[in-house]
Amino acid sequence: MAKISWLFWSLLAASCWGLGPVFAKLGLVKSDPYGALLARTLGVLAALLLWGAVTSGWGSLQNFEARTWGLLVAEGIAASVIGHFAYFKALKAGKVSAVVPVVASYPVLALLLAVLLLGEKVTPGRGIGAALIVLGVFLVQRF
């Protein structure tokens, strides 16, 4: 079987992440952000448990060190709990076309934090890319 390229997976992710906010906005019409996030998380948990059962993917968890567990749990709390709660609150109050570009500007913050906390270097291309993200968010919000 041929190996599926990174481009396929990237386009699939972009498609799902483009569709996700529409589902969330429609789901938030008759729910509050906490309930919506809980329902989403339970659905994700069920899908992951099923996926793990079908693929025997649970075995890799036993090889995780305590530091790995701590970092991944912290990422989950930051991104999936707090971040998605804030995102759902924003979607409930605003338009998908306005909320998503602002939320999608997270690569700029990730770039800054990678420089400050991980010692990564900003190349001219990455700097220009970050500036274009900020400009794009501004243009989407303005017009």
Image (cartoon, rainbow, N blue to C red):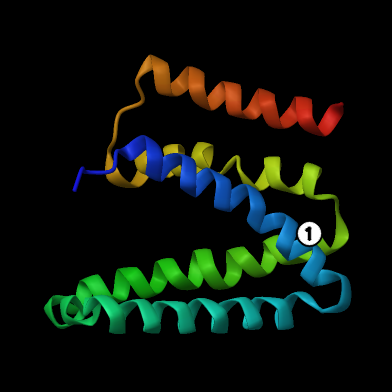
In this picture, is 114 found above or below 125?
below
Residue 53 lies left or right of residue 18; in this view the side is left
Question: Which image quadrant is residue 143 in?
Answer: top right
In this picture, is 122 found above or below 13?
above
Q: Considering depth in this image, is 129 or 112 the residue closer to the camera?
A: 129
Q: How many marks?
A: 1
Q: Considering depth in this image, is 132 or 49 the residue closer to the camera?
A: 49
How far from the left and from the top, in percent, is residue 57? 23, 76
Q: Considering depth in this image, is 87 or 21 the residue closer to the camera?
A: 21
Residue in view at x 58 percent, y 51 percent: 17
Q: Residues within 10 Å of mark 1 (few under 14, many from 20)?
A: many
Q: Considering depth in this image, is 2 or 60 the residue closer to the camera?
A: 2
Residue 116 lies left or right of residue 130; in this view the side is left
How far from the left and from the top, in percent, is residue 70? 30, 75
Residue named by callout 1: 91
Q: Residue furthest left?
A: 63
Residue in view at x 48 percent, y 48 percent: 13
How far from the left and from the top, in percent, is residue 131? 57, 22
Inspect the image, locate mark 1, and give the three-letter code of the amino acid beneath it. Leu
Question: Which image quadrant is residue 104 in?
Answer: top right
Circle 1 SS class: helix
How far from the left and from the top, in percent, is residue 47? 46, 78
Residue in view at x 35 percent, y 76 percent: 51
Residue in view at x 21 percent, y 43 percent: 3
Q: Residue furthest front?
A: 1
